[in-house]
Image (cartoon, rainbow, N blue to C red):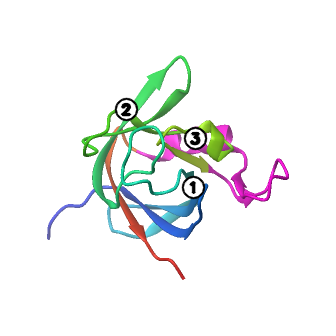
Amino acid sequence: MESKEESIRIKRFFKCEKQVLGIMTLYDALDFPFYEVRTLELPDENNQKRISCIPCGEYEVIKRWSEKFGDHFHILDVPDRDYILIHFANFFSDLLGCIAAGFSHTDINGDGYRDVTDSKKTLKKLNKLLPQRFKLTIYEDLA
């Protein structure tokens, strides 16, 4: 039997002109889901730098640290893009093509768009649960 590794999958389930909402599920080495958070991304603008979410697909991800975001994740080898991260953010206006992770989708600031809550806490938890390197699959399931 082939040995598997932990992975995450992001299911994008809602898109509008300002943002994309998703559910990030963590899977163990036996492919069982064991943790789930909510995601927030910019809309699909044909993979344009700084204004678009990244394309659906499979990616390698590594843990990373920076002054700005502390412990976060770097998505590697995104076509025509660089430094695409999974980091803390609450609003689509905080993003430049990266992915924000949070506990739930709620309209925090009353602008009519759902944000992600408790993003810093969520990133800390993800850093504890995930290995140094793992696979990410992003797909759409729009109802």
- Classify residue 21 by image quadrant: bottom right
Q: What is the secondary structure assignment of the residue under circle 3?
A: helix
Q: Nearer the viewer, mark 3 or mark 1?
A: 1
Of labels 3 and 1, earlier in sequence is: 1
Q: Are marks 3 and 1 in contact (CB under 8 Å)?
A: no
Residue at which label 1 appears: 39
Q: Residues within 10 Å of mark 1 (few under 14, many from 20)?
A: many
* Stretch in magenta: 102-130
Q: What is the secondary structure assignment of the residue under circle 2?
A: loop
Task: Look at the picture and state if 31 lies above or below 143.
Answer: above
Residue drawn at x 72%, y 58% as measured from the top left: 114
Q: Residue 37: where, in percent of width, then height?
A: 59, 58
Residue at which label 2 appears: 83
Q: Residue 120: where, in percent of width, then height?
A: 66, 37
Seen in the image, is 14 located left or right of residue 52? right
Residue drawn at x 73%, y 49% as measured from the top left: 117
